Amino acid sequence: MKNNKILTLERVSLGLSLMFSINWYSKIVMDIFFEFTKNERTLFLIFSLYGIGLPVFIKIINNLPNTDIRKHKMETLFFLKSIFFIFSIFAINILITGICTLLREQNGLTKSINVSYELTIFSLFLTLVFYPIIEEFVFRKILAKKMVGHGNTFYVLTSSFCFALVHIVSQGAASLIMIFLLGVLLSVVYLKTGKIIFPIMLHSFSNLIIFLVPKTLSNFSELYLVIYAGIIFVTGMVYLFRLVRKIKKYEGLKVSLKEAMKDILTNKGMLIFFVLTIFTSVLQQILCL
């Protein structure tokens, strides 16, 4: 007989699968059969995901038991460490992007990419306000209520893994590690404070320094972009090395991580979610959408 942890994870992962499938396949149908302006397309996809998909997800997990998250004061030092960890995430992403670029070049797969970014009030609102609020509501607040009762480590890894998976379709597999680590940070911050405003603020900040600033700088000067990326990279890697040295001292954390990863990777619902995500990502590449 399945225990409550397995059933909860299956219900959550299948709910997320359905929620995002509504969005992904609405996009595919729209791109094949209809023509919309950029803003109309964005609004349609937002509606399919959060107007239709999110209520379906909430309905599926509604009967799962809730666990209250205690609220605590955000310590200034912890908040600053969180910002430096975002720098580390950016540094890791720079490394992965560089490796992927070299591999593409060696295999003759290099193609020109338009990195220009259209900076509008609407795009700023979505990137810095709307997406951080709605994604933190789903992946931190809702999932925490349903999964913290089975252990903090289990919740953090599950939330982060799901958060990373759903971004593969829109941002590619190369972003998996970066978004997973960001999910870990935001989940830990929510557990430590019990206040969703802090993950939202950090999510918005990460979107600013990882996506908006580089894309904006690339429109003006490649030199500015290189200098900016270099500063963030050095700062991030220095902090990352210090953090890794500290984490190695916690033997109990390694055990809980292994147990949680085993629960996640062997769960049927998570496997379905993973396969569906990869299939959809490949399908979009084949259809050139």
Image (cartoon, rainbow, N blue to C red):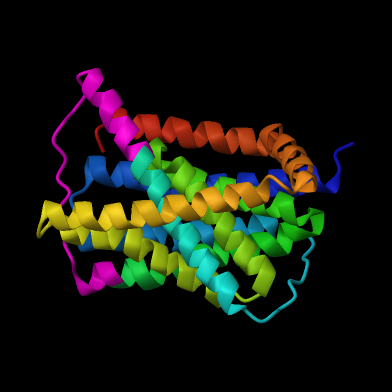
Please check the rendered image and state whether residue 272 is part of the magenta-colored stretch, yes or no. no
Q: In this view, does 56 lie above or below 105?
A: below
Q: Nearer the viewer, residue 122 or 217?
A: 217
- Could you say which quadrant of the image residue 211 lies in? bottom left
Number of numbered discs visible in the structure rendering:
0
Residue range highlighted in magenta: 96-124
Residue ID at (33%, 62%): 209
Residue 277 lies, in percent from the top left, at 48, 37
Most extreme residue toward the bottom is 73
Q: In which quarter of the image is the N terminus?
A: top right
Residue 26 lies, in percent from the top left, at 37, 47
Q: In which quarter of the image is the C terminus?
A: top left
Most extreme residue toward the left is 220
The reply, left or right, for residue 50 in relation to residue 189 is left
Residue ID at (32%, 39%): 97
Q: Can residue 239 be seen in this view?
A: yes
The reply, left or right, for residue 34 in relation to residue 275 is left
- Could you say which quadrant of the image residue 81 lies in? bottom right
Q: Nearer the viewer, residue 259 or 159?
A: 259
Residue 107 lies, in percent from the top left, at 25, 17
Residue ID at (43%, 47%): 167
Q: Is residue 134 above or below residue 165?
A: below
Residue ID at (80%, 53%): 150
Residue 224 lies, in percent from the top left, at 16, 58
Most extreme residue toward the right is 1
